[in-house]
Image (spheres, helix red, strand yellow):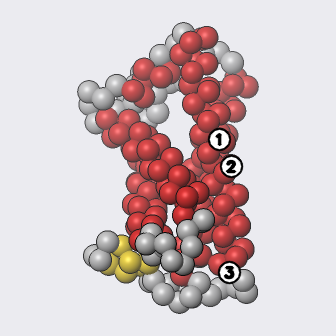
Amino acid sequence: MLKNSITKYGLISTYIHWITAVMVFSLFGVGFWMVDLNYYSEWNKTAPYYHKAFGLILLFITLFRIGWKVTNIAPKELGENKIEKNLAKIAHLTLYGLLLVIMCSGYLISTADGLGIDFFNIVTIPSVGRLFEHQEDIAGNVHEIAAYILIAMVCLHALAALKHHFIDKDDTVKRITKFK
């Protein structure tokens, strides 16, 4: 079943969820490692190239995911706690917002010099140029802070899922881990 139902997530939502998770942790790890590369490192040009290209893939996936979420039904929320349900909605919106902030700030860092972003030698995403003074520094700070907040939110998300699985003993985790 590709689409969501009232009781579980469909294959598209499930795969997008887990692909996003892997990409977020991978891009965070590479970004964390990349900031300490010096000019003489053989990875000084290569790591940012792939970080940007895979960041663009995550942007496309995220935009598709938001569109999919808006046009598809969501499984019925489990549990009775209204506060918990509202916190979950806020957390999910925050995760989407942080992803978009990180990717937009990454774009502003990468294109402040007027050059576009090369996407695997297929297409160059054009630059809008320098929009404000110290663009790469300000956008870099936003990018870094938002990335750390995103990782913290993802950890809270995972803890909430574990709480549902082990304490509440409901099907929250099972609904997003079925790949058939």
Q: CA distance from mark 2 to mark 3?
A: 21 Å
**Three-letter amino acid code of the residue under disc 3:** Gln
Reply above or below: 122 against 6: below
The residue identified by callout 1 is: 153
Q: CA distance from mark 1 to mark 3?
A: 26 Å
**Three-letter amino acid code of the residue under disc 2:** Ile
Label 1 with label 2: CB-CB less than 8 Å: yes
The residue identified by callout 3 is: 135
Q: Residue at x 57, y 21 (%)?
A: 162
Q: CA distance from mark 1 to mark 2?
A: 6 Å
Which quarter shows the N terminus? Answer: top left
The residue identified by callout 2 is: 149
Q: Position of residue 30 (x, y in %)?
A: 50, 57
Observer-nearest of 160 and 42: 42
Callout 1 secondary element: helix
Q: Quadrant of residue 8?
A: top left
